[in-house]
Amino acid sequence: MATLLRPDPTFYPSPRLAGDAPAETLAYMVTFDPAAQSPDALLTVDVDPSSQSYRQVVNKLDMPNLGDELHHFGWNACSSALCPYAPHPHIERRYLLVPGLRSSRIYVIDTKPDPRRPQIVKTIEPEEIANKTGYSRPHTLHCGPDGVYVSALGAPDGGGPGGIFILDHDNFTVKGRFELDRGPQFLAYDFWWHLGYDVALTSEWGTPKMIEDGVNGELLLAGEYGHHLHIWDLPRRRHKQALDLGAEQQMVLELRPAHDPTRAYGFVGVVTSLKDLSGSVWLWYLEGSRWAVKKVIEIPAEPADPSQLPPILQPFKAVAPLITDINLSLDDRWLYVSAWGTGEIKRYDVLDPFRPRETGSVRLGGIVERTGWNGSGQLNGGPQMVEVSRDGRRVYLSNSLYGSWDAQFYPEGVESWLVKLDADEHGGLRIDPEFFVRTEQRAHQIHLEGGDASSDSYCYP
Amino acid sequence: MSWGEAWPWLALIGLGAYHGVNPGMGWLFAVGRGLQESSRRAVLGSLVPIAVGHEMSIVLVLLAIGLTQQLVPPHTVRLLAALALVGVGLWTLARPRAHPRGFGMRVGILGLVAWSFLMSSAHGAGLMLAPVLLGLPVGDHFSNPSQLGLTAALAATVHVAAMVAVMGVLSVVVYEKLGLGFLRRGWLNLDLAWTTVLLLSGAITLFSA
C-alpha cells in the first residue's frame, strides 16, 4: 500500500483553497467504439500551453477487451481523504478507476510512474461486482472519505434495482452494497453528496433493459424513465426522502451539489419534459429539516423542419435541447449546462441559486444547426460531457452521449471532438479557436490531472 | 515526590500532548464542526466529547490492567500487556488506514464520544500507556477496588487534560488564525512513528518485567 510522508499535494481541505491550484497540464478522456470492433481507450491529452505537444493526444491506452463502452470514471482518492471523521491524508491520488458501462468491468489504471502513459494494473471483473453486490453496469464514481463509491444502473440480468456499491481504496476489492434500506428507490444513475450534512443524493435514468437498446419511445411517453431524486443518510446508509419532479420530467441525470460543505443545495439536469420537449435544471435545497426541489432553468425546444430531424423527433417537429450534463464551478458561482440536442452550452451565474442568470453561450454541433468551429465545417454531436478546471477558467467539452442513443439522435454517426472554452470572470464564454482535438472513437468523460470540478469533495468550507 | 514516583505522571502528560497533536485524534474534527457551524463555541464544545471518549478508552485499559494485577502475578501482567501492545502495533502497521465506520460530519455529542472512544481504542492510544500505568501503584499497593478505580481515573484524567490542552490551543489557533491550508504541508505521516511507539512500549513492558 502506497503511503506518503505529507498529504498528497492535490488534496485541498476546501474548495476555496483548491481554486488556487495550479492549472492542469494533462487531461484524461475515455473513448469507445460503438461497433465494438476496436478496443476502447483512455487518451492522454496535453493541455499545457507551454508544451511542444499542446492540444495533442499524447497517448492512447487500449483496453484489453472489446465492447466495454467506457463512459464515466474517477480517482481512487481525492480531497475528501482530509475529512476529519475518517482521515486518510497520506493515501495517493494515483489510480483512475474506469468502468465499462456495458461490460461492467472496472479497470484500475496507474498514472504514477508516467502520468502521460498510464498503465492498467488491475481489472475488477463483473462477476466480483455481481456476486458481492447484486449490481451491474457501473456508472459514476466518487472518492469518499472511507472508500470509493460507485453507482450502478441495475442488476446483472438487466433489471433493477440499481444502486451504489463501495470499493476499498487501497486494494480495490469490492466491499459491498451501500444501501441498508433503499425505501422506494429502484432506478439509479448519478449520485453525489453533501459531506457537511451527512447526506447523499441519487438520481434516476433507467434499468439496463430500458436504455441499452436506445431510448424506448413507449416507455418514454408513458413517463417510465426516472423522475425522482432520492435523499439518503450517508453514514447510516438509509433512504430518507424521495423528491418527485413529476412524471413528465423524464431522466433526472447529473447531480452537482454545492462544493462548499456548509451550503445545502445543488443542481440536477432533466433531459426532457414530455409536455413540450424542454430541458430543465432543478435546484434541491434544505428547507427546515426536509429537502425540497424547484425548477430554476428551462430551455425550450426549437421548432424544426421534420426533414432535418431523426425519426425519433420527426413527430414533434422540434429539436429537444436534451440536457445531458451540467457542471458547477468550484466556487459554486457558475453553472454550465449542455444541451446536446440543440448543440449549445450555456453558462449561468448562480450566485443566487434560486435565480440563475444566463451570462454566456456557445453553439457547437446540434441535430439541426451543425454549428462548426473555426473552419472545421459542420460538426455533429453536441456539447455533452463538460468539465471545469479547478480555477474555473477553462471548460472542456466532448460530444458523444451513449452509443445506442447517439445512433437515434445522430443516425449518421457522431464524429467526436474535444474542445476547450475560456470562461472569463464576468460570465463570458468563448471557444478557444486554437484548441480542437478530433478523436477516432466516440469521446466521453474528461478528467483533469490533479482534480477538477467534478472529481473531489470537501469537508471544510 | 521522587523521580521514581514522578516519571509515570510526566510520561502520561507527554503522551497526552502527543495524542493531542495528531489531527486524526480529534482536534481537526472539532475545527471541522466549528467551520460547518461558523462558531468557535462549536470548536471548543466538540473537545469535551472527544476528551470523554478518549478517557473512556484509557480507563478501560487501566481497569483491565488493575484487575489483571489482582488475578495473576505481575510478570504475567507485563507479558499480557506486552503482547497486546505488539499485537496492536502490528495491526496498525498492516491497516494504518483503519477508522471507525458509520460516522459523518453531523455526529451528535454522543456520536462524537463514541467516535473518539473507537478511534483511540483502534489506534491503541490507551494501550500505549501500559508501561507507564504499570509504573503506577495501580494494583500493587491496593486491595480496595475503589482506590484502584480512583488512581485509574486520576491517571487517565491527567493524560486527557494534557491532550485537551494541546487540542484546544491547536484547534482555536487553526480555526481563528491559521486556516486549514497548512495541513497540506504540515500533516506529517506519523503512522510509522505511532506504530513504533506501540512496539517500543511493548518491548519496554516486556523487558522491564
Image: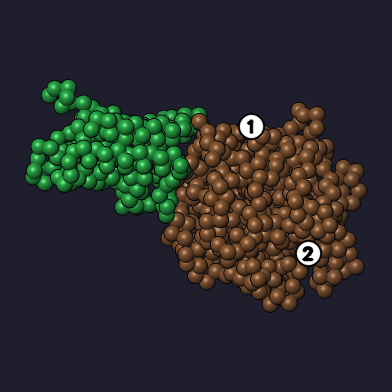
Chain colours: A brown, B green
Q: Which residue is mark 1?
A: A22
Depth check: A187 or B63 in front? B63
**Relative to B116, residue A270 above or below:** below
Q: Badge 2 sits on which subunit?
A: A
- Position of residue A428 in the picture relative to residue A237 (left or right): right
Look at label 2 and name its amino acid: Ser
Q: Residues within 10 Å of mark 1 (few under 14, many from 20)?
A: few
Depth check: B2 or A367 in front? B2
Residue A46 found in image quarter: top right
Of helix, strand and loop, which one carries label 1?
loop
Of helix, strand and loop, which one carries label 2?
helix
On the image, the x and y values in percent for residue A384 come to 74, 53
**Residue in the picture at 45% in, 43% down:** B95
Residue B160 found in image quarter: top left
On the image, the x and y values in percent for residue A437 come to 82, 43
**Residue in the picture at 59% in, 69% down:** A161
- Position of residue A244 in the picture relative to residue A272 (left or right): left
**Residue in the picture at 78% in, 60% down:** A403
**Relative to A415, residue A250 above or below:** below
Q: Nearer the viewer, mark 1 or mark 2?
A: 2
Q: Which residue is mark 2?
A: A404
On the image, the x and y values in percent for residue A19 come to 59, 37
Q: Badge 1 sits on which subunit?
A: A
Q: Is residue A302 visible?
A: no
- Position of residue A41 in the picture relative to residue A140 (left or right): right
Placement of the N terminus of chain B among the 4 image quadrants: top left
Number of callouts: 2
Look at label 1 and name its amino acid: Pro
Q: Are marks 1 and 2 in contact (CB under 8 Å)?
A: no
